[in-house]
Image: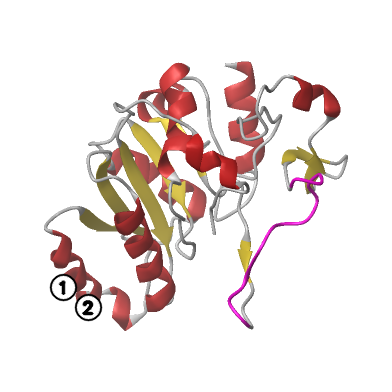
Amino acid sequence: MMKCSCCRCKYWHYDENLLTASIVIVFHNEGWSTLMRTVHSVIKRTPRKYLAEIVLIDDFSSKEHLKEKLDDYIKLWNGLVKVFRNERREGLIQARSIGAQKAKLGQVLIYLDAHCEVAVNWYAPLVAPISKDRTTCTVPLIDYIDGNDYSIEPQQGGDEDGFARGAWDWSLLWKRIPLSHKEKAKRKHKTEPYRSPAMAGGLFAIERDFFFELGLYDPGLQIWGGENFEISYKVTFH
């Protein structure tokens, strides 16, 4: 679940002419309800003038409900939602690069997992920083949904406000560390975006042309893993 961690976010005023986006969702044998809840939440909670397209990349799924049933269902949106199918299993990382190539309408690429839901007002905070600096890559704060009672809880590892930056230890294991006092002091308001030296790699937004300038993902990355290091380094040292 992607949502605002503080009610103050609703009082921010964003540019009326934000960049448009192609939402890219890669899936492999994903459950029907989780995939469709993801798509429905994006359509329901994204201003239509910014939502250029939703691009679904089927990474060689074998489940029957992801074939003709899916093709028929997305016709409800009259071309807004598109599905492209890989002819072999490419893995999550290479399928994302394929998604970037298939997504041609939006100025920004937003990558989402196939089993998440966006919350109200999710779009503007994620895209607005890119409008100011095209080399910025933004990542959301992601809460988790308890599978037992469907309650929404913040991830652990942040500060008292739930804010955390990405990092990894000497074993290259992903970590969420509290926002430092130095970084907090740079913000005038509690709900301003803040810098992070690393990203988790799963959900993020990046200008489409800039992503191609970075070379997309290394073709040597297979299936899953390592993409968070690559994009973090590429963005930082570009």
The residue where tag 2 is placed is 69
Measured as percent of width and height from the top left, residue 98 is found at 36, 45
In the figure, 43 relative to 183: above or below? Answer: below
User: Quick check: 58 left or right of 225?
Assistant: left
User: Is 42 or 228 nearer to us in this picture?
Assistant: 42
User: Quick check: 149 left or right of 56?
Assistant: right
User: Is 116 or 65 nearer to us in this picture?
Assistant: 116
Which numbered marker is on residue 72? 1
Q: Visible in this render: residue 86?
A: no
Q: Amino acid at mark 1?
A: Asp
In the figure, 106 relative to 88: above or below? Answer: above
Q: Secondary structure at mark 1?
A: helix
- The answer to whether residue 115 is magenta is no
Measured as percent of width and height from the top left, residue 214 is found at 48, 24
Which numbered marker is on residue 36? none
Residue at 49% x, 33% y is 12
Q: Secondary structure at mark 2?
A: helix
Q: Residue furthest right?
A: 170
CB-based contact (under 8 Å), mark 2 and mark 1: yes
Range of the magenta residues?
149-161
In the figure, 234 relative to 121: above or below? Answer: above
In the figure, 233 relative to 31: above or below? Answer: above
User: Majority secondary structure of the magenta segment?
Assistant: loop
User: Is 199 or 13 nearer to us in this picture?
Assistant: 13
Q: Amino acid at mark 2?
A: Lys
Residue at 41% x, 57% y is 26
Marks 2/1: CA distance? Answer: 5 Å
Residue at 81% x, 44% y is 159
